[in-house]
Every structure is written in structure tokens, then in C-alpha cells.
Image (tube, helix red, strand yellow):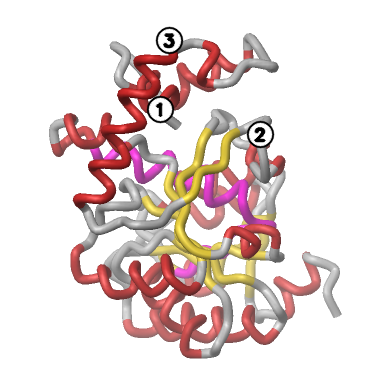
Amino acid sequence: MGAYEALFLEQGATFKRLAERFASDPSALPSDFIEPQIADAAATKVIKKLFTSGIRQFGVRINKAGDYPKKLRDAKHPVELLYYQGTWELSEMRGLAVVGSRKPSEDGKKRAARLSRELVERGFAVVSGLASGIDATAHRAALEAKGRTIAVIGTPIGECYPKENRTLQEHIASDHLLISQVPVLRYEVQPFQYKRHYFPERNATMSALTEGTIIVEAGETSGTLTQARAALYQGRKLFILDSCFQNPNITWPARFEREGAIRVKTSNDIWKALNIE
């Protein structure tokens, strides 16, 4: 953990550059690149920072060690370490991501909630990013249906964005599964404008963690489209609700359909694509 954090404090470190570094040496661990005393000092700072943020219990998953999910290696720039809170075994469930706009229509929120309830009924974990709008709606609907939900966030586990989702985040961290790839120490010292870049990075990880992504509603420049591209790259299913195709203000649904996305007119289109009766 400390070595991972120290790597991200190096000049010019990014998920892409670190992924390329580890790809060049497939047997390497973060600790192979950092002196032990530097790694230990970083780990101490992380624990202190998280403790100050109210985090008393958390875990990590490191590539090539422990229960790191092999499916995450399908990402274009796979991460070497994940922080988590909650029940890690939920990551082994069948799961679908339900994602979309931060400012959805009322119909969009109803569709997200309905889909989440059906996923729960089918025994799937509802995976999303804890953002405002579709994400939060999907998580809450899964909880109300007594299902399981996984949040893959774009901040360290000791931070909450947006602030109004703090109670929801704490509930998921306590009783379900909260995952973050964001380095704690790097995040702390970065200017605010650079922190937004962690959100598209987490979208790629969220996609890799699941069997597919369902886009409920999204604008032409939505960050959700980052996850759409990641899903297709990773060989995951990409589902786009028919209502998106009916929106004359956007062109991305047709583009992704040509690239292999599945148009969802009824939920049966999802189950058929997943070979579920």
C-alpha cells in the first residue's frame, strides 16, 4: 500500500504510466520500485489520513497478491491496488453497472430504479459510481429491494463526493462494498481541478468489474460515455436504453450501437444477451 502511494507521488505519475510500467515487468509489485523506508512512511501517512477522515477499517487488494479480481486486468490501464470497505466477496457476484446522467429526468430516475430492482430479483449486484442522479438512484433502489450494491468511487475512501451522498456512502461501506483506486496522498496534495480526472479512470475499473454496463440516460458529452468505450474495449456487454435512441439531441447511442452496443427496448433484451432465461 505504501509503495503504491509513493509511486503516485513521483513526478508525472498517472494510471496509464504506472500500468505501462507494470506491463513491462509482469512479475513486479509496487514494493519492487520503492525503498522500504519510503513505502513505510507513506503507509503511515495514509493510515493517519484515513483515521482523521473517520475511517477505522479498510482493506486493500493488490495485483498478484490475495483476492485481486483477475477480471480487472481487462482494463486498458489496469490498476495495481484497490482500497475497499465492506464485504469484498460481493465483487465475486454477478454484477451489472447502472449508470447515467448526474441531472437525469424523472423518467430516467424511474427507469434506473426499475432496472435495479429487476437486477436484484435476478440475483445480480447493482454496481454504480455513487454520483448524483442515476448512480445514487440505482444504489438506493437496490438497497430498498433488499439487494446488494457495489460503489466504485472517484475519490479516496475517506472522501465523499457529492457531499449529499455521505450517508449513502457510509451505508454501502458498512453493509455492502465500497471500492476506490484513488491514491490517498496524491489526492490530498492535488489542485481541485485535477481531481476530476479520477472519475473517468474509475469508470473503466467499474466496467471491468462487471459483466456489462447499462446506460440509462446521458448527454452528448457525459462522462458516462467513457464507461461505454471501456466496456466495448474490455469485451463487456454495453446496454443502452431505447429512450436514449429516441432523444433527438444526442447521436452517441447510434454510434455505440454500430460498435456493438445492445439496444434495450425491454429488460428481456438484457437477459437474452446474457443467456439468462
Amino acid at the residue labelled 1: Gly
Dot label at residue 2: 1
The residue carrying pointer 1 sits among few (fewer than 14), some (14 to 19) or many (20 or more) residues within 10 Å by Cα, namely many
Relative to 171, 65 lies left or right: right
**Is residue 201 part of the magenta span, yes or no?**
yes
Question: Foreground: 96 or 189?
Answer: 189
Magenta range: 195-216
**Disc 2 target residue:** 65
Question: Foreground: 68 or 207?
Answer: 68
**Disc 3 target residue:** 35
- Residue 27 location in percent, x, y? 69, 16
- Residue 219 location in percent, x, y? 35, 58
Amino acid at the residue labelled 3: Glu
Question: Foreground: 201 or 156?
Answer: 156
Which is more N-terminal, label 3 or label 2?
Answer: 3
Q: CA distance from mark 1 to mark 2?
A: 15 Å
> In the rendered view, would you say 274 is above or below 159?
below
Relative to 181, 193 lies left or right: left
Q: Residue, x 25% and y 53% (percent of image)?
A: 159
Question: Foreground: 59 or 8?
Answer: 59
The residue carrying pointer 2 sits among few (fewer than 14), some (14 to 19) or many (20 or more) residues within 10 Å by Cα, namely few
The residue carrying pointer 3 sits among few (fewer than 14), some (14 to 19) or many (20 or more) residues within 10 Å by Cα, namely few
Which is more N-terminal, label 1 or label 3?
Answer: 1
> In the rendered view, would you say 104 is above or below 33?
below
Q: CA distance from mark 3 to mark 1?
A: 10 Å
Q: Residue, x 45% and y 58% (percent of image)?
A: 85
Q: Residue, x 35% and y 35% (percent of image)?
A: 183
Amino acid at the residue labelled 2: Ala
- Residue 246 location in percent, x, y? 48, 71
Say what secondary structure mark 1 lies in: helix
Residue 95: quarter of image: bottom right
